[in-house]
Amino acid sequence: MPDDVSLHITRMPYAPLGATMEMALHISEPALVAQCVTDVHAVSPLVAAYACTSGSFVGGLEGEAALVAAMVDAGAPAAVTTSGALLAALRHLDITRIATATPYTADLTAGLSSFLAEAGVKVVAASGLGLTSDIWMVPYDVTAGLVRDTDIDDAQAVFISCTNLPTYDVIATLEAELGKPVLTANQVTLWSALNVIGRKAVGPGQRLLES
């Protein structure tokens, strides 16, 4: 975030579920997302961002659009989702073939591939860690190793999914090593939200932010 831009965060109601398809479907409910917009309305945000990859891809393109519409209907001047932001970033970089690295179980990893295919993006390689909890505790070296193991020459970029997975400090290093853009869930979300309000995201060594 630029120094003069403030970021205000609220969370959806807690649900005692693991990071499964059931959870993704639960948190993709537009009414729940709309309530979150209401919760931060007092600070008059210029844009609202739904920061969850699985919750914004599980319903396909139609489901993603419904989340954006719900946020706008709830009073957000503009709105983005993580999965929608990913598509915007890929269009911006003119990328149509990617590898995906996720912390998810196999069905959620496949769900991301299906969402991207619906949008005309080919997933040429995909892998996941099979986790349903403690995703925020995954060490950087594990994430970096997953990216290296997943990437193939045919992939124009690698996307690391899940806003709960720490990734920021490995992006520049991996891009330099792999010689291609490495996109992450939180990165594309904030990049897209800032674009909406005419600002640039900050991140040295990140091709998306420097393009």
Image (spheres, rainbow, N blue to C red):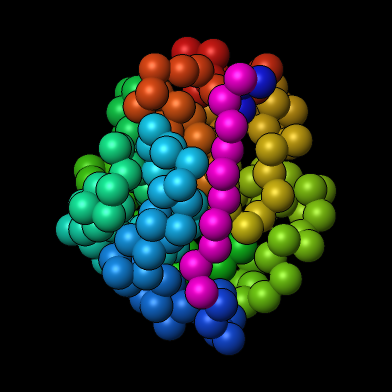
Residue at image position (40%, 43%) is 48
Give x and y (percent) for residue 21: 43, 78
Give x and y (percent) for residue 165: 66, 55
Q: Quadrant of residue 94?
A: top left
Q: Main secondary structure of the magenta part?
A: loop
Give x and y (percent) for residue 197: 38, 23
Q: Quadrant of residue 174?
A: top right
The answer, for residue 25, to whether it is visible in the render is yes
Residue at image position (61%, 72%) is 130
Residue at image position (45%, 58%) is 39
Closer to us: 171 or 36? 36
Q: Quadrant of residue 34?
A: bottom left
Outermost residue to the left: 62
The answer, for residue 155, to whether it is visible in the render is no
Q: How many labels were placed on the picture?
A: 0
Closer to us: 173 or 57? 57
Q: Is residue 8 magenta?
A: yes
Closer to us: 32 or 115? 32
Closer to us: 4 or 89? 4
Q: In the image, which residues are magenta?
A: 4-13
Left or right of 91: which side holds 151?
Answer: right
Q: Is residue 193 magenta?
A: no
Residue at image position (70%, 49%) is 166
Give x and y (percent) for residue 1: 61, 27
Outermost residue to the bottom: 16
Q: Is residue 58 above or below residue 195?
A: below
Outermost residue to the front: 42
Q: Is residue 179 above or below residue 107?
A: above
Left or right of 138: which side holds 164?
Answer: left
Q: Is residue 150 above or below residue 164?
A: above
